[in-house]
Image (cartoon, rainbow, N blue to C red):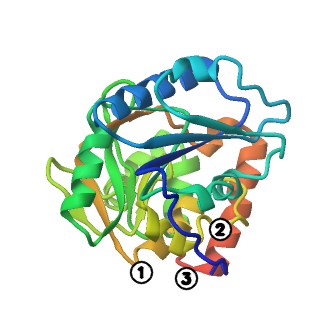
Amino acid sequence: MIEQKAPDAHPDYELTIGIVIFKPDRTMLAKTLQSLQRAVNEVTPLRAKLYIIDNSPEPSDDGLKELLPDLPLQVIAGHGNVGFGAANNMVLGMAGKFHLVLNPDVEMEPDALKQALAFMTDTPSTGLITPRAFNPDGSTQYLCKRYPAIFDLLLRGFAPRSIKALFRQRLDRYEMHDQIADTPFWDPPIVSGCFMFFRGDVYRQLGGFDPRYLLYFEDFDISLRAGKIARIAYVPAVKIVHEGGNAASKGLWHIRQFARSAFIFYTTHPLKLF
């Protein structure tokens, strides 16, 4: 558990957004920021501010402000690669009434923020929203998960397609295919960190992310902790496209980080082998 005093809400902003980048694909980042600007423009008036936390060794904010003509932007850089969770935590004390943790490879529908804010307003028990997600080819991407067994993680992340096919029913259950539909459902145990729409006081009460995770599993951990103090909702009216990608396809360094974070996760939360 993270021992950190929860700061007060930022008094000036109804919505804050945090995007962590590391040597970003500039074309993809531009699409993300443009879609964010469109979504903010759909909610008028909306007091919003974007924080870009740049973990790159040689950060540069060239051209970022031009992509966001109507959205206040603050770039935080020069700290090096402290990890996804620790970088997001740099703006914990500046989070507004609502706070969105957003990946730099996500494009949202123009009404995504409008739908998320409306759902939060209508359901005060909701502390965290996860959206309906699609891959770039239009197929469904499953962001909700049941509690993972190590066997499920190895299958999903590293097994060849032929082996995955043998365990398709098991993997579908892990990814909650039976719950993903056109209506909201409540309390998925784990949701993806690519788009986490928090009620600000819940995010602050959690103390943000556990900074021990450099990469991977930090969203698993914060989801489980969030579910103990508030309700998590899958809201299909909030739609995004997520580029995504699995650890196995990214090289040995990513595989090592996956293994390291899995060790931290299963020494913090219950171990489940199968």
Q: Amino acid at mark 1?
A: Lys
Q: Residue at x 64, y 38 (%)?
A: 74
Of 78 and 94, which appears nearest the observer?
Answer: 94
- In depth, the one of 79 and 251 nearer the eye is 79
Tell me where residue 65 appears, x and y as whole percent: 60, 23
> Up-down: is 252 above or below 137?
below
Upstream in sequence: badge 1 or badge 3: 1
Q: Is residue 185 left or right of residue 51?
A: left
Q: Which residue is mark 2?
A: 210
- The Cα–Cα distance between marks 3 and 2, rounded to whole angstroms, is 17 Å
Q: Quadrant of residue 104?
A: top right
Query: Marks 1 and 3, how far apart in space?
Result: 15 Å
The residue at which mark 3 appears reads as 270
Query: What type is the residue that disc 3 sits on?
Result: Pro
Task: Name above or below for residue 173 compared with residue 104.
Answer: below
In-front residue for pair 75/229:
75
Helix, strand or loop at label 1? It is loop
Q: Position of residue 164 (x, y in %)?
A: 44, 48
Nearer the camera: disc 1 or disc 3: 1
Label of residue 228 in the image: 1
Tag 2: amino acid: Asp
